[in-house]
Amino acid sequence: MIIEHELMKCNCIENSCPVFSKCCFLPTECHPDPEGKVSLLFIGQGGGSDERKQGRPFIGRAGTRLRQQVLYIRKKLGKHIGVAFSNSIRDNPDGNRVPTPQEYKYCLKHLYKDIAELKKRGLGMLIPLGNASKLVFMPGSGSMLMDHGRITNFLNKAFGRINIMPTYHPSYVIRNAPKFNDKCLSEYDKIVLKDILKAYESCKDIKQEDKDIDTDDDILDIDLSDVL
């Protein structure tokens, strides 16, 4: 069964933003389940050169790794779980530096609007990827070593309250394990896969039978020849 992805376009009109003229206005990309629901939203910092060219989030090398991880979990569970991909800002600052508070101010309201829409479709968990994204939702929090896999909640007037659980950015995983090997998973991939499984298990709207999810190290050996 092929389920087409959907793009939630950014309709930013903030022409006072200093990077408005060159922003690629990355959308939020949804891959719903067969019922049209989305359970997990992965949130990075911003797009790179590949994302700018294709106009889609998480489509470069790091994005491919994340999509491989999601597809692996889908095959492990034997079901097409609904996910979405987005970023805290709609384009990355020059040099991939951490965005300024003003840049976040311009962009976050568009992300929050998308979160509000996705909650209507069953969104139960935000997954910030990496420290830069994590600190947007968990200011003053500690290291990713301490925070990954820890579920808390985030409150915003645009969408109310929602669960949140950070994990490592795929670029960090790639630095330590360059290739995704579904026959012999790296320890770094295992950590992220367990975090994602925990996030899915904890979504409020999943059925009881979905909660019997094994997150031990003996993850199924499956053939992973493509990505989302």
Image (cartoon, helix red, strand yellow):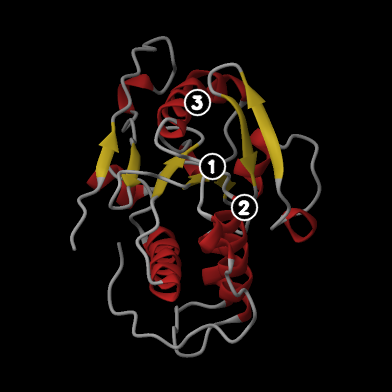
Position in image of residue 38 (x %, y %): 40, 45
The tag on residue 139 is: none
Q: CA distance from mark 3 to mark 2?
A: 21 Å
Q: Nearer the viewer, mark 3 or mark 2?
A: 2
Q: Which residue is mark 2?
A: 202
Point out which mark residue 124 bears: 1
Answer above or below: position of 109 versus 228: above
Residue name at image x 61 percent, y 59 percent = 168
Quadrant placement of the C terminus: bottom left
Residue 23: horizontal and vertical position, in percent?
34, 29
Q: Position of residue 202 (x, y in %)?
A: 62, 52
- The residue where tag 3 is placed is 112
> In which image quadrant can residue 146 be found?
bottom right
- Secondary structure at badge 3 equals helix
Work out whether mark 3 precedes mark 1 in sequence or the reverse, and give the earlier one: 3
Circle 1/circle 2 CB separation < 8 Å = yes
Measuring 38% from the left and 73% from the top, which residue is drawn there? 75
Q: Earlier in the sequence, mark 3 or mark 2?
A: 3
